[in-house]
């Protein structure tokens, strides 16, 4: 049952901007560089690129197509497509698990995004001046220890997200991405130029692209695969929800290639720039973990001529990137409550924002009071939420989407949505989606997750 007809984004490029906005986020600028650092550099980058190409791109096409075909939020869309395809209702788990994964991701995402709000303030008030590796680490540790402050920024970012969603699909989401995304790209280019002039650019490139076979492991493969879902916002319905607002006369394949290309470029550029600063800063290692961006970059900003300006530019850019992602994490749930129960978008986003906010309190505490507590698989609360959503829920959602679109939807449904694609693309896409993507995801999931689960049970 559905109450309202979906809006369609009329302005040229809105869908690409929104989907790229969802994709480009903390995953690219904060997470990708630090997991690359922790997993050895080049070999990891290669596995990640392979996952984007063989798994991410085909599944993203499937997700967009489902949303646009049904023109509804992911939960109602899957229900409706099950009906048209004569498939079991069980497939609606795609929509439900996705909306849940969105809440889980949002809960810890706004905590990290909150750090960037603090760091804009730090940059503006001159706190970076003269920092070295040690004092920068102290500044960051001080923030993590201050749970009141973390909670305040977590709350602020949740409210920023709710505000855009409450404004609606056109006045909120569409206007936001049309302003924020171009701004983000300009800021990124300024930063890249600066890193090329001032940083250890060549060492950084060598680190990111030199291949070391001993760095290949199932765990690294799992992290690379999980990240390919995370960074492209796949497997949880964000892209499906946006697909419902995509005009029918746009090519799905071309759009997906563009979004995946932009997302990968931003990750690589951010990685190269950040490692260029890391290698130029004595006493800091590329494997520094989640603090990488917040510890190393301030040192660089604090010791250069235009440091305040560049520091503010950088952290504002991260805020824009994160903001255009958080709105997409909540959109599936908000659209569902709105279309299914007629709840106003204001109420729906406040309600789901409150749920995610509450779940996020554990992540706030995992950096201080709960830092020794273990939740799932011997990990902290924050790491548990991230691992559960990124490495299990998103890949599982992705497999289900691949199987559903590949095996259950009939040719006539697919061809209707893919009428602008070339015959060659169609020939390749369907078999990849039917066989290759699900099998690849399952192999990595089984080899990557089982040892971790088994390790816990043996202990
Ligand atoms: N893609 C976003 C990032 O890289 C995170 C995200 C995941 C957003 C899933 C929406 C859905 O930061």
Image (cartoon, grey):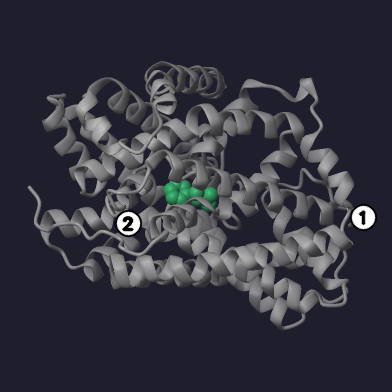
Q: Residue at x 37, y 66 (%)?
A: 174
Q: Which residue is mark 1?
A: 282
Viewer-closest of 397 and 413 = 413
Beta carbon of the mark 1 residue lies under 8 A of ligand 1: no
Instruction: Work out which residue is located at the far right of the displayed protein and give it.
Output: 282
Q: Which residue is mark 2?
A: 331
Q: Residue at x 57, y 72 (%)?
A: 149
Q: Quadrant of the C terminus?
A: top right
Q: Residue at x 86, y 51 (%)?
A: 201
Q: Is residue 157 above or below residue 62?
A: below
Horizontal side of 170 relative to 70 (left or right) equals right
Sequence-earlier tag: 2 or 1: 1
Tell me the number on the disc at residue 255: none
Q: Residue at x 60, y 28 (%)?
A: 50
Residue 408 appears in which quarter of the rendering? top left
Give percent across and percent down for residue 406: 32, 23
Viewer-closest of 259 and 291 = 259
Measured Cα–Cα span from mark 2 to mark 1: 43 Å
Residue 148 appears in which quarter of the rendering? bottom right
Residue 228 appears in which quarter of the rendering? top right
Q: Is the residue marked by circle 1 packed among few (<14), some (14-19), or many (20+) residues within 10 Å?
A: few
Horizontal side of 441 relative to 342 (left or right) equals right
Q: Can residue 162 be seen by looking at this rendering?
A: no
Horizontal side of 152 relative to 48 (left or right) equals left
Give percent across and percent down for residue 329: 39, 53
């Amino acid at each position: 049952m559905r109450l309202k007809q979906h809006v369609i984004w009329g302005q040229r490029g809105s869908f690409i901007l929104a989907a790229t906005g969802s994709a480009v986020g903390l995953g690219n600028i904060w997470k990708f560089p630090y997991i690359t650092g922790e997993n050895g550099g080049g070999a990891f980058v290669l596995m990640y690129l392979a996952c984007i190409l063989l798994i991410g791109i085909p599944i993203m096409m499937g997700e967009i197509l489902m949303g646009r075909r049904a023109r509804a939020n992911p939960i109602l869309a899957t229900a409706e497509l099950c009906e048209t395809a004569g498939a079991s209702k069980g497939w609606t788990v795609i929509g439900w698990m996705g909306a849940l994964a969105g809440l889980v991701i949002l809960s810890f995402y706004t905590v990290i995004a909150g750090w960037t709000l603090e760091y804009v303030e730090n940059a503006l008030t001159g706190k970076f001046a003269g920092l070295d590796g040690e004092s920068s680490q102290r500044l960051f540790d001080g923030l993590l220890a201050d749970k009141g402050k973390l909670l305040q920024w977590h709350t602020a970012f949740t409210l920023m997200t709710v505000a855009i969603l409450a404004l609606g699909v056109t006045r909120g989401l569409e206007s936001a991405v049309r302003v924020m995304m171009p701004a983000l790209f300009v800021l990124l280019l300024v930063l890249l130029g600066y890193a090329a002039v001032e940083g250890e650019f060549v060492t950084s490139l060598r680190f990111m692209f030199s291949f070391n076979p001993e760095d290949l492991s199932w765990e690294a493969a799992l992290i690379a695969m999980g990240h390919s879902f995370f960074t492209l916002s796949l497997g949880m319905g964000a892209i499906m929800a946006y697909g419902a607002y995509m005009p029918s006369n746009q090519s799905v394949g071309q759009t997906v290639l563009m979004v995946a290309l932009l997302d990968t470029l931003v990750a690589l550029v951010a990685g190269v720039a950040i490692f260029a600063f890391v290698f130029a800063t004595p006493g800091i290692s590329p494997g520094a973990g989640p603090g990488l961006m917040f510890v190393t970059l301030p040192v660089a900003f604090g010791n250069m001529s235009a440091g305040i300006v560049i520091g503010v530019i950088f952290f504002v850019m991260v805020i824009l990137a994160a903001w255009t992602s958080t709105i997409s994490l909540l959109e599936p749930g908000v659209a569902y409550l709105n279309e299914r129960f007629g709840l106003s978008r204001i109420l729906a986003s406040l309600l789901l924002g409150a749920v995610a906010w509450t779940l996020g309190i554990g992540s706030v505490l995992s950096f201080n009071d709960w830092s020794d507590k273990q939740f799932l698989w011997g990990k902290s609360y924050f790491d548990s939420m991230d691992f559960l959503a990124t490495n299990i829920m998103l890949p599982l959602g992705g497999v289900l989407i691949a199987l559903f679109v590949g095996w259950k939807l009939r040719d006539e449904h697919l061809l209707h949505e893919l009428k602008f694609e070339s015959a060659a693309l169609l020939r390749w896409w369907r078999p990849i989606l039917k066989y290759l993507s699900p099998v690849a995801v399952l192999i990595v999931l089984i080899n990557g997750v089982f040892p971790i689960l088994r390790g816990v049970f043996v202990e």
